[in-house]
Amino acid sequence: MRPLARLLPLLLTLLPVTAAAQATVGVDPVARLFTATPGQTITQVLNIYNPNAATQKLRIVAYLTDMNISEVGETEFPPAGTLKESSAAWTTFTPAEIQLGGHETQQVRYTIQVPADAKPGTHWAMLMFEGQDPAAIPGKTLASFRLRVAHTMYVNVQPVRAEGSITGIFDALPKTETDLYQIAVQYANTGNAATGVQGRVELRDARGDLAATLPLELTVALPGRTVLLKSSWAGPVPKGQYSALVILNNGNKNSDILGEHVVKLPFDLKARPQTAAPAPAAAPAVGTGTGGAGGKP
């Protein structure tokens, strides 16, 4: 499905990575989208690589998780099999653990066995690759780093359909003349396929003249969920009433999704003042000390 294919880089930017500089690892490819029918078997080979020149081996453990995206765009990684759309139970992989030296690459192979009774729609899971800081010493290191990168697997079990609607348009009026007017459009994915949603807001004055066009950036809409697409409007803008026409597209080349909203600016908006470039940071004071820091794995 082409709309989802455009989304793969966006989906992957949502994966948080916590890593020490010396413990970086990569995966290629970073995502795959498969079109399948019930009962079909899918196989893929991944290249896992260590781009560092370190001589010490990096231990990497592989495991499956689910992935969910909240309405406000926060990405969550619940345990494998949590979501009803999860394909984790269909997926096996080998090996489950590898050791990588500097500039080394090894392969991991996975197989997706689509059940004969699989429901139509998009199913997905993430194959995580987690490594540890090679310099960590058990029992002595106060804080060690773990990293994880992911390969995302999407399976479109046919037939899939992209459907959705605008379920709300919300705005926040500026409180001062240099504030931004902010607008948020709520989109509900009522189809069974993950899609990319994007669009614009056309603002027209009382005469019908186009005053501004606000972009609504490409956003992931998972099936059965809602997302918010946000934009803002900066001055100079005269006060008054404006009509806002929201135009969204979820990958359907033949039709857009429309919504309307009335905007009432209580006062003129002025151009926002230009912010000066930040001054160079001062050199840190020289000192000694010890300490540790922890992070969520």
Image (tube, rainbow, N blue to C red):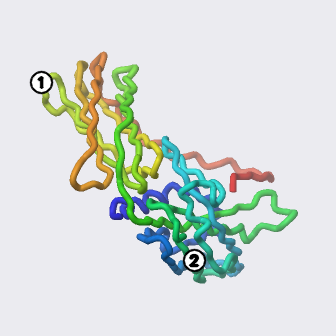
Q: In the image, what residue type sits under mark 2?
A: Tyr
Q: Is residue 278 above or below residue 182?
A: below
- Rendering quarter of residue 181: top left
Q: Residue 12, percent across and down?
A: 49, 60
| Residue farthest top in this picture | 266
Is 242 left or right of 75, judged from the image as shown? left
Q: Quadrant of the C terminus?
A: bottom right
Disc 2: which residue: 110
Q: Residue 10, percent across and down?
A: 43, 57
Q: Is residue 120 above or below residue 100?
A: above
Query: Toward the viewer: 79 or 162?
Result: 162
Of labels 1 and 2, earlier in sequence is: 2
Disc 1: which residue: 207
Element class at badge 1: loop
Q: In the image, what residue type sits under mark 1?
A: Arg
Query: Toward the viewer: 187 or 83?
Result: 83
Is 134 left or right of 48, judged from the image as shown? right
